[in-house]
Amino acid sequence: MERRTPHVVPLDSVPVIPADEAPTKVRIARLVTRERHGSNLLLGACWMDPGERTNVWSFEEEDRTSAGDKWYGPVDETYFVIRGRLRLTWEEGQLDIGPNAAVYLAPGWSYSLENVGDEPAFFVYSMAPAPV
């Protein structure tokens, strides 16, 4: 295995993926990726306007998603909210997340996210293993 070195990835050095092209239909930027860095995890940033919501994405073992939704398979994901108020919904409930809070999304569920606040939300996320 190739030995990798640490390096800085400024947010403004990576492209922002527009909502209509992003897998969960909200604006994202992927800072650390398998393709660019050989990383086993993905690190990204996300912006959501008030009232904006994602499609459904699945971390389940099998793909049972509907058209327009996204299946990743069983992965772990975390968010750290910097600004805004978000509502995470899954089959058995929902929870609200605000600034300076982290949330863990476990494999085996399908999720969606909505900005329920009155200001734009900004958060960073990580996913492991990184999608291919």
Image (tube, rainbow, N blue to C red):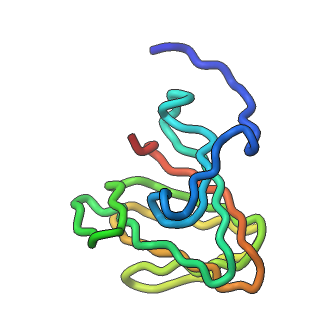
Q: Residue at x 77, y 70 (%)?
A: 83
Q: Residue at x 66, y 76 (%)?
A: 97
Q: x and y percent of residue 18 in the render?
A: 57, 58
* Number of numbered discs: 0
In the rendered image, the quadrant that contains the C terminus is: top left
**Extreme top residue here?**
2
Q: Hey, which quadrant is residue 60 in on the image?
A: bottom left
Left or right: 74 in relation to 115: left
Q: Residue at x 44, y 63 (%)?
A: 106
Q: Residue at x 55, y 14 (%)?
A: 3
Query: Taking 125 as reference, is 69 above or below it?
Result: below
Q: Nearer the viewer, residue 75 or 22?
A: 22
Q: Hey, which quadrant is residue 86 in on the image?
A: bottom right
Q: x and y percent of residue 72 in the render?
A: 36, 55
Q: Nearer the viewer, residue 120 or 59?
A: 120
Q: Nearer the viewer, residue 99 or 53?
A: 53
Query: Taking 80 as reference, is 37 above or below it?
Result: above
Q: x and y percent of residue 124 in the render?
A: 66, 56
In the rendered image, the quadrant that contains the N terminus is: top left
Left or right: 126 in relation to 83: left
Q: x and y percent of residue 114 in the render?
A: 57, 79
